[in-house]
Image (spheres, rainbow, N blue to C red):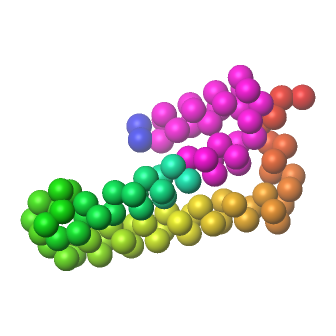
Amino acid sequence: MRLAMPLVFIIALSYFFGVPYIFTLIGMAIWAAFGHLITLDEDKPDGWSNIESTDEFYKKSKRDLRIKFAILLLLITIPVIFPVVTTFGVKK
C-alpha cells in the first residue's frame, strides 16, 4: 500500500502531462531526501521526533538520509548514462 500512491502519481503525470517516468522518480527522490535533510535536527537527542533522546535514533536517521541521497544520485545518473529512459512514459 505504501507504494500505491507514488505509482499512481508517476503514472498519472506520465499519462496526463507526458512526463517521463524517470523525471517523476527523480522529483520524488529530491522531495524525500531534502525533506529528510530539513527535518534532520528534530532527530537529534532531545529533538522533537526523538522522544527517547537516544543517539541510536539519530544515527539511524543519518544512515537513512545517506541512503536517500545515494538513491537520488543513482536516479540522476541513469538518464545521463542511458538517455533512452527519458522516453519511457512519454505519449507519442
Name the residue: 56% across, 47% down: 28
**Where's the C terminus, which quadrant?**
top right
Q: Is residue 61 depicted above or below 18 in this figure?
A: below
* Residue found farthest to the right: 92
Whether the magenta-drawn stretch holds residue 19 is answered as: yes
Q: Is residue 35 depicted above or below 20 in this figure?
A: below
- Horizontally, residue 84 falls left or right of residue 2, namely right
Camera-side residue of 23 and 6: 23
Name the residue: 71% across, 32% down: 14
Whether the magenta-drawn stretch holds residue 89 is answered as: no
- Horizontally, residue 92 falls left or right of residue 47, namely right
Q: Position of residue 89 (x, y in %)?
A: 77, 37
Camera-side residue of 78 and 69: 69
* Residue found farthest to the top: 16
Dominant SS type (magenta): helix
Q: Position of residue 24 (x, y in %)?
A: 65, 43
Name the residue: 78% across, 58% down: 79
Camera-side residue of 24 and 40: 40
Name the residue: 74% across, 61% down: 78
Q: Is residue 23 depicted above or below 12 in this figure?
A: below
Q: Position of residue 73 (x, y in %)?
A: 63, 66
How many tags in the picture?
0
* Residue found farthest to the left: 52
**Where's the N terminus, which quadrant?**
top left
- Horizontally, residue 67 falls left or right of residue 18, namely left
**Quadrant of the rendered image containing residue 16:** top right
Q: Is residue 3 depicted above or below 50 in this figure?
A: above
Q: Position of residue 57 (x, y in %)?
A: 23, 69
- Horizontally, residue 79 falls left or right of residue 4, namely right
**Quadrant of the rendered image containing residue 75:** bottom right
What range is drawn magenta here? Answer: 3-28
